[in-house]
Image: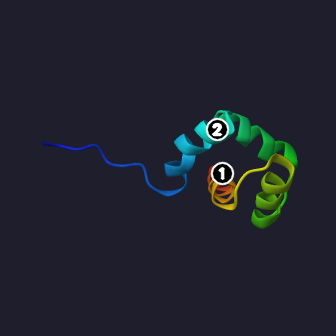
Amino acid sequence: MASENPVKGPASYFPSIEKKYGQPISHWMQVLQAAGPLRHMELVAHLKGGHGLGHGHANALVAWHLAQKK
C-alpha cells in the first residue's frame, strides 16, 4: 500500500495553526509582510506579542515566510 509523503518542516504546523487561531495561513503571511523587514526573532516576537501566537507556531510561520522570500 503506497502512502503519501507526510508534510515536513514548518508547513506541518499549518493545520493546527489554522484550527487554533481561526485564520488561514495566508492571513499570517500578510501580517508578516506588513511587519516589514524584521529579523527572524523580531518577527516571532511580533506574532507572539501582538497576535497571541505560541512560540512554536510563530516560529514555523516566520520560517516559512522567510523561506518564500529566497
Q: Which residue is mark 1?
A: 61
Mark sitting on residue 48:
none
Q: Position of residue 13 (x, y in %)?
A: 54, 50
Locate residue 70: give its quadrant.
bottom right
Say whether marks 1 and 2 touch (CB < 8 Å): yes
- The three-letter amino acid code for the residue at tag 2 is Ile
Quarter of the image with the N terminus is top left
Relative depth, front residue between 18 and 27: 18
Locate residue 23: give its quadrant.
top right
Q: Secondary structure at mark 1?
A: helix
Direction from residue 6 to residue 46 in the image, left or right? right
Relative depth, front residue between 54 and 63: 54
Badge 2 local density, few (<14 within 10 Å), some, or many (20+)? some
Q: Which residue is mark 2?
A: 25
| Residue drawn 67% across the image and 50% down it | 65
Whether 49 is drawn above or below 27: the answer is: below
Badge 1 local density, few (<14 within 10 Å), some, or many (20+)? many
